[in-house]
Amino acid sequence: MNSTDECCNDENGKIALGVPLMYHFLENNNEQSLKVEDLQEYHDCEDDEDDDDLEASTLGDGTQSPAEVKLKIKKSLLELRCKIENAILGNFLLGEPDKELAPEDVAVSREQLREISIWGVPLLPSKAHEGTDVVLRKFLKAKDFKVNEAFDMLQKTLIWRRENNIDGITEEDLGSEYGNAGFLCSKDREGRPVCYQVCGVFKDRRVYKKTFGSNNRCDKYLRWKIQLVEKAVKKLNFREGGVDSIIQVFDLKNTPMQGTKELNSLSKKALILFQNYYPEIIHKSIIVYAPFWFYTSQVLFSRFMNQRNKKKFILARPQKVTQTLLKCIAPEHLPCEYGGLRRNNDEDFSPSDKATELKIKGNTVSKVEFPVTELGVTIMWDVTVVGWDVCYKEEFIPDDEGSYSVLLQNQNVEGSSTRNSFYISEPGKIVITVENGTYKKRKMFYRSKARTTVPMFILL
């Protein structure tokens, strides 16, 4: 891989070491430490939109106007469409046909090629499928709208998919032992599927040996990583205005530093495969809980990168993991282990139960109230505070001044979200008090609902 793919941004838009280079560092610097002078001062980079990237890739020296850029893009797409149409009708999109084939076999091959598709989208432009141009633009954009290079990339992608039976990979049973190493969970704020890659599970040497103990097991793990991305791709909508990319989150918490040669090698292979055969499918890759040795290994590569590739990776500082992820993922969709409200097999709340945001200023006390007038119900609430480090109290205060308040929780809270419930036997309200004793602002997300409950003494 070239150096243009080896850098990333932190959550503030500053240059940091990319995942591919991190694996290279692991292999070559386990016994070494970097000197302070080997690190370079970070540089800010603008957080432009994708359309700006698209223009930047075609403007070149900046002499073309926006209208000329759009015209060039349309011209490139038209040329690629014509090139693919000719290649399909000429029966050479996947290479020259075998000259020894019988005429009837050639006819069958030609007819099959007319039906060729990628990611469920037909590639023959004359079929006028609304997703064809969306897919072709991805290959063009990956190659800076150079038609011949985009065509070569598409051709190699199709050949790789055919040789490795990628179209059928989602139906394969690759085992459940990788379930904790990666999973799909909900979506980001724009509707993109989110794929989580968790490296900490391999800290257990028994798990590591079981996963990478032989070449066959290594190949199976790599195929599983491809299968995970293919499952995410199946959730995409390759139509104008549709969701056509995914988010990846790399969780490096408890990642072993030494003795992971196989993991490092396979991770690099996977990254190269995704770069070569899934152009513009991965919208962002967010790295969270990076250990100290990873963070201190940052080096200078920003001068070799173009703006689009540099924006693909975001490094979230350990103390800002939740804050960074919430920029992309709503709290209802973010797993609770990352500071969100989503729990596995949740029977109380669903992602459709939207959370309310409350901003808490430094050195202030904020309160949230859930009034309840209906008796015989259980009220439940979900709360998370970005960054926590606050004093947190929950209590039930009856409307009747002669009744006693019930203290439900009173403690300093740090970490993931908290959930609680209370059975209402008299009118009153649930009051949540958050005391922010720091000078930093905090954001609190909360939601609640009530459900009818039959008291246990009635059942008895």
Image (cartoon, grey):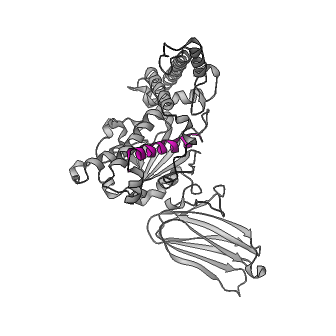
Principal secondary structure, stretch drawn in magenta = helix
The correct choice, above or below, for 288 with respect to 7 in the image is below
Residue 73 in sight from this viewpoint = yes
The correct choice, above or below, for 388 with respect to 218 in the image is below
Q: Pick the quarter of the image with the C terminus.
A: bottom right
Q: Position of residue 367 (x, y in %)?
A: 59, 71
Looking at the image, how many numbered discs can be counted on the residues? 0
Residue 289 in sight from this viewpoint = no
Q: Position of residue 372 (x, y in %)?
A: 72, 72
Residue ranking furthest to the bottom: 402
Quarter of the figure with residue 451: bottom right
Q: Position of residue 250 (x, y in %)?
A: 44, 51
- 297 or 413: nearer the eye? 297
Please indicate whether residue 222 sits to the left or right of residue 237 in the image.
left
Residue at 61%, 24% (x, y): give it: 115
| Magenta stretch bounds | 213-234
- 42 or 103: nearer the eye? 103
The correct choice, above or below, for 304 with respect to 111 in the image is below
- 174 or 260: nearer the eye? 174
Q: Pick the quarter of the image with the N terminus.
A: top left
Q: Position of residue 343 (x, y in %)?
A: 58, 61
Quarter of the figure with residue 231: top right
Q: Is residue 443 magenta?
A: no
Residue at 53%, 22% (x, y): give it: 77
Q: Is residue 226 magenta?
A: yes
